[in-house]
Amino acid sequence: MVIEWGTALYQLLAFAVLLLILSKFALKPLLGVMQKRQDMINEQIDSAEQNRKEAEKLLAEQREEMQKARVEARELIENAKKAGEQQGQEMVRAAKEEAQRIHQQALAEIQNEKDQAVAALREQVASLSVLIAQKVIEKELDASEQDQLVQEYLKQASEEL
């Protein structure tokens, strides 16, 4: 096998020119596109990492807010229970006071009516005594008639009461 150096040199030179042309027009744009793609992928990775960190931060904030809301809800429930108990105790106290007031008022009314009844009874007894005395004086009666007359007037007085 004989090597033709002229043809080999020509092929080598043609290959070198082709390599230069390809590297200038094809390889540089291809490497540029690959670099842009690598940069874009790196940006997306950075963006995804940043989004993940923000999501974790928001999740932690939401958990903290939920915990605060639970604590506030418990406090509100406790306050409502206390207020309800206080209101219930106040209502019981007011009802007891009202019952005591009504009881005292009823006792006062009973005493007043009793006093009025006693006064009326005294008046009737006095008027009956006067009537009996008048009748006795008007009529001189013997003892049995006088007893009978007193009994009649007492019976009459008790019927009027």
Image (tube, rainbow, N blue to C red):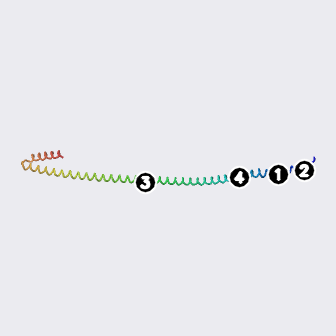
Mark 1: amino acid: Val
Q: CA distance from mark 2 to mark 4?
A: 43 Å
Residue at 82 percent across and 51 percent down: it is 17
Mark 2: amino acid: Gly
Q: Which residue is mark 4?
A: 36
Give the x, y percent position of residue 51: 62, 53
In the image, is 84 to the left or to the right of 48? left
Q: Quadrant of residue 90?
A: bottom left
Tell me the mark number nearer the camera, choosing from 1 and 3: 1
Q: Which residue is mark 2?
A: 6
Which badge, 2 or 4, is on the more N-terminal residue?
2
Mark 4: amino acid: Lys
Tell me the mark number nearer the camera, choosing from 3 and 4: 4
Mark 3: amino acid: Ala
Q: Are marks 2 and 1 in contact (CB under 8 Å)?
A: no
Q: CA distance from mark 1 to mark 4?
A: 27 Å
Give the x, y percent position of residue 89: 39, 53
Residue at 57 percent across and 54 percent down: it is 61
In the image, is 102 to the left or to the right of 160? right
Q: Quick one: label 3, few (<14), some, or many (20+) residues within 10 Å?
A: few
Which badge, 1 or 4, is on the more N-terminal residue?
1
Q: Nearer the viewer, residue 103 or 131?
A: 103
Residue at 36 percent across and 53 percent down: it is 94
Which badge, 3 or 4, is on the more N-terminal residue?
4
Q: Which residue is mark 1?
A: 17
Q: CA distance from mark 1 to mark 3?
A: 95 Å
In the image, is 122 to the left or to the right of 23? left
Q: Quick one: label 2, few (<14), some, or many (20+) residues within 10 Å?
A: few
Q: CA distance from mark 2 to mark 3?
A: 110 Å
Q: Which residue is mark 3?
A: 83
